[in-house]
Amino acid sequence: MTTPDWDSARAQFPTLQKKIYLNSCSLGLLSRRSRDALNKYMDLWEEKGAAAWYVEWFAEMEDLREQFARLINASADEIAIMPSISATLAAISSSIDLQEGDQLVTGELDFPTVAHGFHAKARSGVETTVVRSDDRVMISPEQFEQAISERTRLVATSRVYFTSGYIQDISTICDAAHNAGAIAFVDDYQATGQVPIDVQEVEVDVLVSGGLKWLLGGPGITYMYVRRDLIPELEPSITGWFGHRDQFAFNPHEMVYKDSAGRFETGTPSVSAMYTGAEGLRIVNELGADAIRQRTSELTSRLVSSLRERGFDLRVPPDDEHHASITMIELDNPGPVVDRLAERDIIVDFRPGALRASPYFYNTQEDIDIFVDALTELTRK
Ligand SMILES: Cc1ncc(COP(=O)(O)O)c(C=O)c1O
């Protein structure tokens, strides 16, 4: 693994000239390259009108699939381009013929949109189990194993939890789902880019991620990997003409699904988000997820040790190996502290009872030190 030139990678993000930005788990920063890509998209729109689709937009969509596939060790035909994580979950659960008494399993620490989508199935008699966390940091694979039964049709959980930065043992959870004949769905929004993954090794069925956070593409663009063998079995009822094998035959008489994961797409995608998304993925692929993980681990361990030295209570995983680049600092009333930090151009965010700091490869150890000093000063007054 060659070490990237982190200073030139950092120089791609103009925000960092003015701010210490430690909030990538909410929104990854805009790079000069994504801005240029967006301009290119608009130039094509202006110059070519609808012909822009054929000159480049469709090709960009294919390149986007390639870029995401490369990052997770999949093939482009296993990738669907989707507008949100919620939409990916809706597409997959609409592909399963759910019956009364069937069970869906998710975790209490997963992003709640997963559980919301599941609870909405209660009117068809489908039961949702939300596995509880004892410490608000993690849920053990054994707890998932105990919750999964022969009635389970879908298990959906994240590789990295958005409120604790805990990295789950996804492989064991996927195995437990498969042993029960259920589909294993991994919400990887907080993980892909910052923690390496190989979908062949993990044997996940569906893995979803997107541009918003660690993949530096902004809102409105998500990527869904569906294992090739599973694709023919899944026929989504939430569908549209982008999922049709002969999209441009305009045939209203029958729905024939694409053979590829493109079958899960519905309508016209946000092309502007495809451009920013593709450039974000190119940056991450060029740097390499292994190098990024090494860099963010160093920043996170400095952050954790400095905060502990100052006596802060942390809500974090028990060891570095399971800790992604999200650190929760327990505070009774974090909102006003986040505002005071923003006045000093230090950007973090909060969730109930904790301030959340999430450095990325473009941060430095100096960023961490300035943040910890400012936080100490503001909370000890
Ligand atoms: C882990 C995780 N999943 C899902 C979401 C929400 O996804 P969407 O708004 O695309 O449905 C978020 C936050 O934005 C998240 O952190």
Image: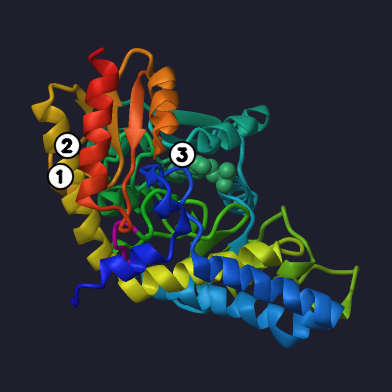
Give SS at disc 1: helix
What is the number of the mark on residue 301?
1
Who is closer to the viewer here, 3 or 101? 3
What is the number of the mark on residue 151?
3
Instruction: Tell me the distance, in whole angstroms, between the alpha carbons under discs 3 and 2.
Output: 42 Å
Going from N to C along the chain, the mark reached first, 3 or 1, is: 3
Q: Relative to 198, does residue 211 appear above or below in the rendering? A: above
Instruction: Tell me the distance, in whole angstroms, between the alpha carbons under discs 3 and 1.
Output: 42 Å
CB under 8 Å between discs 2 and 1: yes
Instruction: Tell me the distance, in whole angstroms, between the alpha carbons under discs 2 and 1.
Output: 5 Å
Q: Within 10 angstroms of label 1, few (less than 14), some, or many (20 or more) residues? A: some
> Mark 3, mark 2: which one is toward the viewer?
2
Going from N to C along the chain, the mark reached first, 3 or 2, is: 3
The residue carrying mark 2 is 304
Looking at the rendered image, the quarter that the C terminus falls into is top left
Magenta includes 195? Answer: yes
Determine the image quadrant of residue 82: bottom right
Residue extent of the magenta highlight: 194-198
